[in-house]
């Protein structure tokens, strides 16, 4: 038997013939193998896996229709009905091919993101004198995607602390009226640093300027 299905076998001799119907079922497939059995991918990559089928005597046979593919962890990789694998997150997961009682596995490893750049937001921050506000530094990978976990540490600094200071978490405090550069530097030299200009204003908070209400309009 080469593949699952139904066929007719006919034998003839001296003008006499006889036929039998043979049904090949899942039980005729004793084992499966996935190729490659181990693969390493990057996020967003796609890899095609294939499957081989063997009978109970170890002879390779045609791959039957209806092989079921599945992923043990769909948050890391997903596989479609044709064995095509797509990587979503770093980590490792098993890909399983199953037909009847026969089953095979392949190990897929997705490499972690490679940090390549850093960016501070907002791009044009402002803060009131004596006020504080947070800034955020985001590290991006080679695909331009933000790295949510495992990003290199970031060091914050102010070019002129007489104008504004910044703590280790990126929270700035306005000291005197004026402007200064705020710098976020990655611990990974390949990532580098990003800089924004912070404006410290009189009552300027998050980009809004508050002015004193004229006395004649004041309540009371």
Image (tube, grey):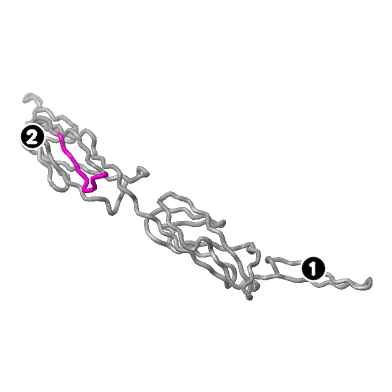
Magenta span covers which residues? 181-190
Q: Position of residue 148 (x, y in %)?
A: 30, 51
Q: Is residue 61 above or below residue 89?
A: below
| Most foreground residue, 98 or 132 | 98
The relative height of residue 122 versus residue 80 in the rendered view (above or below) is above
Q: Residue at x 11, y 36 (%)?
A: 159
Instruction: Determine the CA span between mark 1 and mark 2.
Output: 91 Å
Q: Neighbour class for label 2 at 10 Å: few (<14), some, many (≥20)?
A: many
Taking the magenta stretch, the answer to whether it contains residue 189 is yes
Q: Residue at x 35, y 44 (%)?
A: 142
In the rendered view, would you say 92 is above or below 181?
below
Residue marked by disc 2: 163
Magenta stretch, overall SS: strand
Mark 1 residue element:
strand
Residue underneath mark 1: 8
Label 1 Cα crowd, 10 Å radius (few <14 / some 14-19 / many 20+)? few
């Amino acid at each position: 038997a080469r593949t699952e299905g139904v066929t007719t076998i006919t034998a003839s001799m001296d003008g006499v013939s006889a036929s039998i119907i043979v049904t090949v079922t899942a039980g005729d497939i004793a084992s499966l193998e996935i190729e490659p059995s181990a693969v390493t991918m990057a996020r967003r990559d796609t890899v095609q896996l294939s499957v081989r089928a063997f009978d109970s005597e170890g002879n390779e046979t045609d791959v039957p229709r209806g092989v079921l593919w599945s992923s043990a962890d769909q948050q890391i990789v997903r596989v479609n009905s044709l064995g095509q694998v797509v990587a979503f997150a770093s980590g490792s997961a098993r890909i399983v091919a199953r037909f009847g009682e026969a089953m095979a596995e392949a190990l897929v490893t997705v490499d972690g993101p490679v940090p390549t750049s850093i960016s501070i937001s907002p791009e044009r921050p402002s803060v009131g004198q004596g006020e504080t506000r947070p800034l955020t530094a985001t590290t991006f990978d080679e695909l331009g995607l933000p790295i949510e976990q495992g990003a290199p540490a970031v060091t914050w600094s102010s070019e002129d602390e007489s104008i504004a200071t910044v703590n280790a978490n990126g929270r700035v405090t306005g000291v005197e009226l004026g402007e200064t550069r705020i710098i976020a530097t990655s611990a990974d030299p390949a990532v580098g640093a990003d800089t924004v200009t912070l404006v410290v204003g009189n009552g300027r908070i998050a980009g809004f300027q508050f002015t004193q209400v004229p006395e004649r309009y004041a309540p009371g």
